[in-house]
Amino acid sequence: MMRQYELVERVRKYNPAVDEDMLNRAYVYAMRAHGSQKRASGDPYFSHPLEVAAILTDLKLDDATIVAAVLHDTIEDTDATREEIERLFGPQIGRLVDGLTKIDKLDLVSKQARQGENFRKLLLAVAEDVRVLLVKLADRLHNMRTLHFVPPEKRARIAQETLDIYAPLAGRIGMQRLREELESLAFRHLTPEAYLAIETRLEELRAENGRIIRRVEDELKQEFAKRGIEAAVTGRQKTPYSVWRKMERKSISFEQLSDIFGFRIVVGTVAECYAALGVVHTKWPAVPGRFKDYISTPKQNDYRSIHTTVVGPGQQRVELQIRTAEMHEIARYGIAAHTLYKDLNGAEGGVDLAQESGAYRWLQETMELLAHGDSPEEFLEHTRLELFRDQVFCFTPKGKLIALPRGATPIDFAYAVHTRLGDSAVGSKINGRVAPVLSELQNGDEVEILRSADHTPPAAWEAAVATGKARAAIRRATRDAVRRQYSGLGRQIIERAFERANRAFSLDRLKGVLPRLARGSVEDVLAAVGRGEIYSGDVVKALYPDFTEDRKTAKGPGKPGWLDAKDAASLKFQSPGASEKDGDSAIPIRGLHGGTPVRFAEGGGAVPGDRIVGILTPGEGVTIYPIQSPSLTRYDDQPELWLDVRWDVEPGSKALFPARVVVTVVNEPGALGALATLIGGTGANIDNIAFTAHSPDFREMTFDLEVSDLKHLSGIITRLRASPLVSKVERMVG
């Protein structure tokens, strides 16, 4: 176990102005607080926070972070309180330790909904101070190093959580070395047989190819020395987990892997990086398509380096990474390599990390998703999706660089630039050419977004985009559009209710009775009426408590095909040819599309030319029925649900409407094909076909059609009846 003076000396090596007194006090306080507590390994519990602090000293973090690491388990596992820690060590350390305590209580591998909510809390704690995440990652790393002392069931849970959440988070903030160790340890515990098999093969390769590694190192050093480039060249193998992932991703065997060995070239300046690249490509042939310049276009986690693959000695493919010493520090330590937490001596302030670090900006952007009302499981899905994806780099027409996950579309690009741009996007140009908005973007594409001010993004885009930000924004815009539709429908219903009651109505007056309707705004009331959650008569009564509704009962017109049912005084069955004057109290129906609060009844629908009625269904909006529908008898005793509706289809409209016909046909080969051809010849669409065995000689076929109007449907039925294959045709209504 690390001694008190050893902790101070570890910090003093990189921070001569270390607050020795605070470190000593934290050491003593934590040792006394944990007392005789033991870990699963049998070691004193106090050894764990000391090891966490030691990991963080390797990252050269500030005094406050080291002290928080020493104290990080005191609130959760001892009698210590945040108030006491703040009194002894200051509010900054108290906040850090409290944030860590909250994270420790989270279960990130439970059921999806709770896991998503806990992941929200994790990132919210990190958002207040990213040092919380640094300490938590160090804590997780030490726990993984000692995971073999934990019972098997718990061991698997912790390893899976590490692989799913903490390792990707470490990579997302640029801490690649820590990520690799977390992945390797988790892989070893989750699939020990695969880990052992790959590790054995890597050992064999290391023994076989040791000379090649030394040869590449020596030859590169000689070439650089000839050109006056001072460079450190080191060779290494891929980790077992990275090998395993590549085998899975590409569905290949170990023998098919061609780039297991990699070399890192560290030089002094950016100019020398490109000079070194020229030396490498002059020495050995480059592999086409395997060059990436992350210096000119850094990754979002601040990673900068040149990647290339060459065919080296013995026709062996060799990966090379070329970077400066500063880039190498950021590649190893990520967000911790920035100067914000260095040489601060525990003081507040320092470098603006949001400006300096792309990784921290990603954390901030992820926080924005929390404000948009997504469900916890959706938030978790989208965030994990972006944690694991590689990137593409695209440009705006003005040259601004936009980093996106691989598989991103122009819609993702638009939302990455600004939410308003994404909401109004109707088209795109990629490299100056018009392209579909759901095209997959490639590195270096210049993307221009075409806009329309009154556009709402289609709900179908949500499943096609790649970023959580775009999905959240599309869902929000769709939700708002549906709400506006419900509100518009609700306003029409309310206005007609007040007209029938001969009472004055205004939105301003409605504001005064919101408490009576248990709604927070006028918009909420309108939407609730449109959804059928509030009856329009109750709104009238809220404004006019003395109002009494006189619900009369009347018979229908009694004409053939009309429903003879109970009716409210407000209900008017209206023929399609009625004048605008006759129908001034009916709600016009133009056509029904996905996401609107109006829909057709199942089992047949209605088409223009049918006499129709609307039924207000709580939580669903309005359902349109043909007036002859037998389903309407269910609503005989609920006249408050009936709405006056009329068709309002523009002449020449190409809109299609649902209809169902049941055809009894002779059971002989080719009958279905003949009928389908007949129906297709009329210009109708066949949406679905169902079969019923009527008898050995006949089959009953149910066709769900899409037709333009009643005349179109009648023509189809007439042609079907004229077919020698058809015994009977009947239209069905819901």
Image (tube, rainbow, N blue to C red):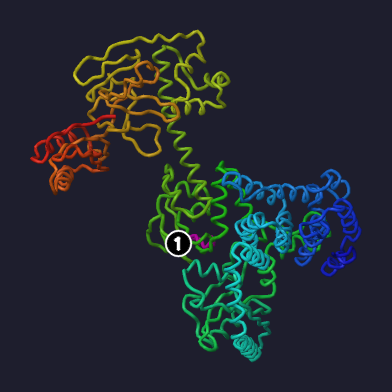
Q: Quadrant of the C terminus?
A: top left
- For disc 1, the marked residue is 441
Please, is residue 550 above or below residue 310 in the view?
above
Q: Is residue 275 above or below residue 707?
A: below
Q: Mark 1, residues whose alpha carbon is within 10 Å: few (<14), some, or many (≥20)? A: many
Identify the amino acid type marked 1: Leu
- Residue 497 % position (x, y): 41, 17
Q: Within the image, what quadrant is residue 114 found in?
A: top right
Compare residues 34 and 298 and report the one nearer the observer.
34
Q: Nearer the viewer, residue 209 or 27?
A: 209
Residue interval drawn in magenta? 395-402
Q: Residue at x 30, y 17 (%)?
A: 572
Q: Give percent across and percent down for residue 289.
A: 47, 75
In the image, 650 versus 461, the foreground residue is: 461
Does residue 162 appear to the left or right of 79 in the view shown? left
Q: Is residue 235 left or right of residue 438?
A: right
Residue 481 falls inside the magenta stretch: no
Tell me the element at label 1. loop
